[in-house]
């Protein structure tokens, strides 16, 4: 039959191409990096990994894949890495890491920027890795951030905006809720499903809170300008977990790590495994060292709010904004 | 290495069959799909983590999808809202519903839970590699669904569905209520979509509320590609070409990822490629129809 012939020819041609796809030779190192979407923070991780690994192994080849925000594509990428027999695969953010761990069983998978790797089912405990899985959590110091905000200005009611569809943001919100409960602070939360809703969400809680906390939430951080705008009108201090976006957007303080440094830390982990360490023996890493974490204080915003920042806090700041000038002491 | 593409293609073929049902048979472009696909996934994940068996998860997922389809059809029928808007409304509402089903979470892992694939590999242990077992399993599942659909379209009701998409007035004259038919049709279609989502969650090892992004487009692309490769009017061929189209779509996207860098194409360009692919298939199919004697339209 003619139609069937045509169908078969088309299919055959396509699958012949796939079958002919080069299978990586054993010798050169091939690292597959799968990220969920092109985003400044995730791109910075990717860059950090590449720089560190090529520093140690100059011949390394990278296969950089991105699911364009389509979670259903994450498993296609995992299948691709599996068939290419990559030396090692890195999954940036929760869904891509989950898809890699699910598909690739016989070679190391490193996760990066996963806030709650146990909750995501990647590993059974933070104390050690799985036979082929270990990685870095981007757990941000929620308690320290809220405590710092409380020190700069007493907080009785804390507002929090987060994205209900972002796994990382949901687990951070649960921690913030817990911390507030322990500190005796009333926690007012509101959720958004995309960055266009952020402004309105902040407006609805602005009248009821003494401060706003923003976690490592990709969607809300990309709308940080909207948060800062509403906060300024209502004279509320904002504490953010992302110092890099706070350089351009006026918020009182931002304390967290730089995703580029996190990428470099991921790269160092990749190098350790390429040199023969067993993922199973490596516990989940956290970005807790003082050199990993940046504190940004915006003195202009503090002035507008009538707050004085204690000298010891200023002394630990890595970036200070004063009179519109960025100062890195 | 080909098994992965075939397995994914087969899983998404179930969704594509649902899209084909509304889009081609009912002429009801339905965007509920972007919400009912993740709905199937989250129902499945919740059922499995609650300790129930995969079969009840699949049934519940199918049921959830049917309900979602009913809502879309009811909005369209009762409030005289256009199809597209009715679908978008349901899809939007499903975002919240899906997060509720996951108990206010966005993502639920299945990496440490027994899924239907765990059972399939356990049965085939030692006989064939796990990947091939999955391929055979999904091949059988899709075949069963295809044959069931073929049978359904040969029943009186199935034939009326075909007529409804072509000429609603004629169906009305025959004393059949188109609203009831749309309710059943859109419901069944979304049941299939949710079922596909339930399988996808188990295959990729987690359910996520954002899973629906880009699903309608990949379903449409599969239907169009199928029409591009096989020209036929017989229902058995119509459903077969949807399945082949779904596999082919996954294969082409895979090729784009594999060979794209030779032509300086990055993964960011793949959505553009998917769109162009649909347009090209449409153009070729249209050209053939104009040129074809008698102009049979499928």
Image (cartoon, coloured by chain):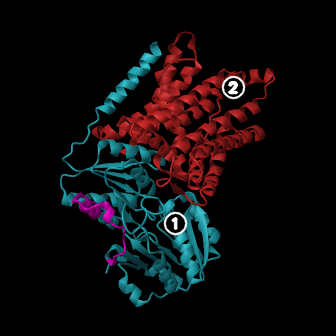
Chain colours: A cyan, B red
Is residue B213 in view from this perspective?
Answer: no
In front of the other: B74 or B100: B100
Tell me the SS state at disc 1.
helix
Q: How many marks?
A: 2
**Which residue was labeled with disc 2?**
B161
Note whether A54 is above or below A319 in the view shown.
Answer: above
Q: Which quadrant of the figure has residue A132?
A: bottom left
In the rendered structure, the answer to whether residue B163 lies left or right of residue A237 reads right
Note whether A193 is above or below A311 in the view shown.
Answer: above
In front of the other: A31 or A239: A31
Rendering coords of residue B193 (x, y %)? 58, 39
**Which residue was labeled with disc 1?**
A171
* Magenta-span inclusion, residue A252: no
Label 1 chain ID: A
Note whether B152 is above or below A312 in the view shown.
Answer: above
Q: Which quadrant of the figure has residue B274?
A: top left
Label 2 chain ID: B
Tell me the SS state at disc 2.
helix
Q: Residues within 10 Å of mark 1 (few under 14, many from 20)?
A: some
Rendering coords of residue B214 (x, y %)? 51, 43
Q: Residue furthest bottom?
A: A311
Q: Which quadrant of the figure has residue A42?
A: bottom left
The residues tagged by marks 2 and 1 sit, at their Cα atoms, a distance apart of 46 Å
Is residue B10 in view from this perspective?
Answer: yes
Note whether A14 is above or below B288 in the view shown.
Answer: below
User: Residue A27 — which label?
Assistant: none
* Magenta-span inclusion, residue A268: yes
Rendering coords of residue B32 (x, y %)? 62, 42
User: Which stretch is magenta?
Assistant: A267-290
Q: Residues within 10 Å of mark 2 (few under 14, many from 20)?
A: many
Q: Residue at x 21, y 60 (%)?
A: A275
């Amino acid at each position: 039959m003619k139609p069937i012939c045509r169908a078969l020819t088309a299919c055959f041609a396509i699958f012949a191409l796939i079958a002919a796809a080069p299978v990586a030779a054993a010798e050169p190192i091939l690292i597959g990096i799968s990220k969920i979407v092109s985003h400044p923070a995730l791109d910075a991780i990717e860059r950090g990994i590449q720089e560190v690994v090529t520093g140690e192994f100059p011949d390394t080849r990278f296969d950089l894949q991105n699911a364009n925000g389509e979670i259903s594509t994450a498993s296609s990428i995992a299948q691709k890495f599996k068939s290419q027999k990559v030396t090692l695969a890195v999954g940036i953010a929760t869904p891509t890491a989950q898809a890699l761990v699910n598909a690739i069983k016989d070679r190391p998978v490193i996760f990066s920027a996963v806030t709650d790797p146990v909750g995501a089912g990647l590993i059974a405990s933070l104390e050690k890795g799985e036979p082929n899985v270990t990685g870095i959590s981007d757990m941000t110091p929620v308690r320290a951030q809220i405590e710092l905000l409380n020190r700069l200005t007493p907080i009785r009611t804390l507002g929090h905006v987060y994205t209900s569809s972002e796994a990382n943001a949901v687990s951070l919100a649960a921690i913030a809720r817990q911390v507030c409960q322990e500190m005796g602070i009333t926690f007012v939360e509101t959720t958004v499903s995309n960055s266009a809703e952020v402004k309105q969400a902040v407006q609805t809680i602005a009248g009821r809170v003494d401060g706003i906390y923003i976690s490592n939430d990709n969607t809300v951080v990309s709308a940080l300008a909207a948060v800062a705008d509403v906060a300024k009108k209502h004279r509320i201090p904002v504490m953010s977990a992302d110092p890099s976006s706070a350089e351009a957007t006026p918020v009182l303080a931002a304390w967290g790590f730089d995703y580029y440094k996190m990428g470099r830390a991921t790269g160092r982990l990749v190098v350790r495994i390429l040199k023969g360490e067993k993922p199973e023996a490596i516990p989940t890493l956290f970005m807790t060292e003082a050199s990993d974490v940046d504190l940004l204080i915006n003195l202009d915003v503090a002035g507008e709010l009538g707050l004085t920042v204690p000298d010891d806090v200023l002394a630990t700041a890595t970036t200070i904004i004063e009179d519109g000038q960025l100062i890195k002491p | 290495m080909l098994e992965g593409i075939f397995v994914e293609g087969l899983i998404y073929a179930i969704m594509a069959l649902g899209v084909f049902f509304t889009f081609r048979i009912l002429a009801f472009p339905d965007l509920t799909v972007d919400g009912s696909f993740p709905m199937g996934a989250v129902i499945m994940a919740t059922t499995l983590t609650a300790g129930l068996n995969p079969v009840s998860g699949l049934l519940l997922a199918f049921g959830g999808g049917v309900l979602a389809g009913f809502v879309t059809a009811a909005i369209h029928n009762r409030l005289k809202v256009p199809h597209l808007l009715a679908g978008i409304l349901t899809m939007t509402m499903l975002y919240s519903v899906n997060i509720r089903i996951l108990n206010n979470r966005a993502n639920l892992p299945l990496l440490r839970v027994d899924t239907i694939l765990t059972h399939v590999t356990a049965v085939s242990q030692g006989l064939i590699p796990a990947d091939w077992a999955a391929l055979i399993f999904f091949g059988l599942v899709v075949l069963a669904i295809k044959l069931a659909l073929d049978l359904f379209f040969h029943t009186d009701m199935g034939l009326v569905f075909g007529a409804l998409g072509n000429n609603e007035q004629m169906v009305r004259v025959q004393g059949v209520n188109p609203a009831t038919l749309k309710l059943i049709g859109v419901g069944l279609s979304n049941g299939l979509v949710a079922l596909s989502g339930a399988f996808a969650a188990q295959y990729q090892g987690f359910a996520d509320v954002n899973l629906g992004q880009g699903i309608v487009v990949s379903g449409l692309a599969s239907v169009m590609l199928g029409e591009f490769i096989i020209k036929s009017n017989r229902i058995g061929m119509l459903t077969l070409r949807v399945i082949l189209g779904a596999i082919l779509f996954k294969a082409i996207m895979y090729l784009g990822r594999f060979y794209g860098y030779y032509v300086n194409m990055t993964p960011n360009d793949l959505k553009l490629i998917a769109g162009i692919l649909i347009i090209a298939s449409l153009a070729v199919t249209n050209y053939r129809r104009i040129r074809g004697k008698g102009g049979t339209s499928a």
